[in-house]
Image (spheres, coloured by chain):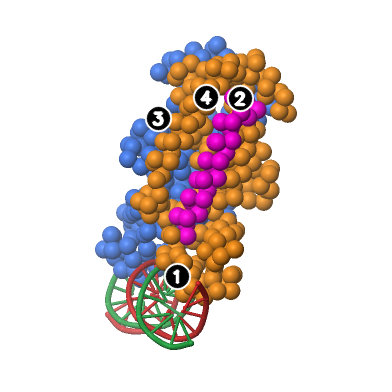
Chain colours: A blue, B orange, C red, D green
Amino acid sequence: MNTKGKILEKSLELFNHQGVHNVGVRDIARALEISPGNMSYHFPKKEDVILALMEKMSEGNNICFDAYALNEPSLQSFIALYEGLFTNQYAYRGLLIGNTEFEEVLRKRYAYTKTYEKRVTQLNNILIGLRSKGVLQLSEPDQEMFLSFLAFLGRSWIHESFIYQQDTSAKEIIQHYIKLLKWQLSLIATEKGKLQLAQLA
Amino acid sequence: MNTKGKILEKSLELFNHQGVHNVGVRDIARALEISPGNMSYHFPKKEDVILALMEKMSEGNNICFDAYALNEPSLQSFIALYEGLFTNQYAYRGLLIGNTEFEEVLRKRYAYTKTYEKRVTQLNNILIGLRSKGVLQLSEPDQEMFLSFLAFLGRSWIHESFIYQQDTSAKEIIQHYIKLLKWQLSLIATEKGKLQLAQLA
DNA sequence: GTCTATAGATGGATAGAC
DNA sequence: GTCTATCCATCTATAGAC
């Protein structure tokens, strides 16, 4: 792997374990046994590292959505989608947590709002698909509320897990939120949908 | 007001508007037209300011729970409880957002886990009360899941609102999450409970 | 209690040699 | 591309006068 790739890999590792604000350019350089100056050659600013990682995460999310689109809509594949998304987000958890420091930068240089709107649209279409398959029963306003819930869950679970479940394994953490999602689905599932959920357990 | 009180007040104001990590001891001193040295006299470390504010917030939450306990359990007063809690949390939003920097300190000096466990117990009792009033229909596992949802909502809504709804007014933000909570309640309410919810709108 | 002045540490970023 | 050396800004915290 080239130096640029190594920097990204090691940075993420350190960010995840110590938090973005506790990891300086020096720390990354030391961990890779390269010089701080060399870091700056590849990434002139620290925010450039963060930005590159954010984009990698976003690509990972894209892959999950693309994989979902290949199957027939079902609650099983919907849950699988979220397991994929959560696993990917967890891999970048360091960025998603202590990012208030770089929030302004991200707002300027990373298409925050645009990405978010894209995701909401994707999710909305997915819900329409699930309804047309007869596994979810949602009125229009219900669908809007469920979308709010999904948006909230997708953005915030990593925060909660970080603060309140630090000693729990990744797998357990992810399963906790998957369980919450399944429960939510069970409240709005049709009989056919409930059958699909039962097959998951 | 004494200097100590003024420092707390102004600190919170600045934290809320600029984020904890963007507000230095100097900034607070300048805003109050006192010296940085004087700041250190009242609060030897920056974390002492944060800790004092966290405790004030916690007291505010206590007041909300105490007020709830005075009434007969109902979904109306449950919603009122959450409106109170959200309003209080919003007033301290700066602390609840960019706190990864002081997270370790808080973990040591502020009874994070203890406070959290206390809240969960309180909420659990509240749910039992609502069930006994016949407004919620929840099996045991359902109650556990709903408790997970409430815990998640209570801790994470402020994060989401900060990142994704920066240009929205406090009132609108709070109402968004109250709406989400109402919808959740409607999914698990009895007929009697649904009547109570209908009276709210 | 409040001030001024400054210590002391850290971290991002650059200059210039190799 | 990579290094060493260093600049410069920033921030917390302290010392000591008033």
Is B61 part of what is drawn in magenta? yes
Q: Is residue B103 visible?
A: yes
Query: Can residue A68 be seen by looking at this rendering?
Result: no
Label 4, label 2: how far apart the Cα atoms are? 13 Å
Q: CA distance from mark 3 to mark 2?
A: 36 Å
Q: Which residue is mark 2?
A: B72
The residue identified by callout 4 is B127
Tell me which corner region of the image, top left, top right, bottom left or bottom right, holds residue B47: bottom left
| Magenta stretch, main secondary structure class | helix
What x and y, as percent, mark residue B170? Answer: 66, 47
Which callout, 4 or 2, points to the residue nearer the camera?
2
Residue B169, how many percent across, how many down? 68, 48
Single out the mark in the foreground, 1 or 3.
1
Q: Secondary structure at mark 3?
A: helix
Dot 3: within a 10 Å radius of its alpha carbon, few (fewer than 14), some, or many (20 or more) residues? some
Look at discs 3 and 4 and give the one toward the viewer: 4
The disc at residue A175 is 3
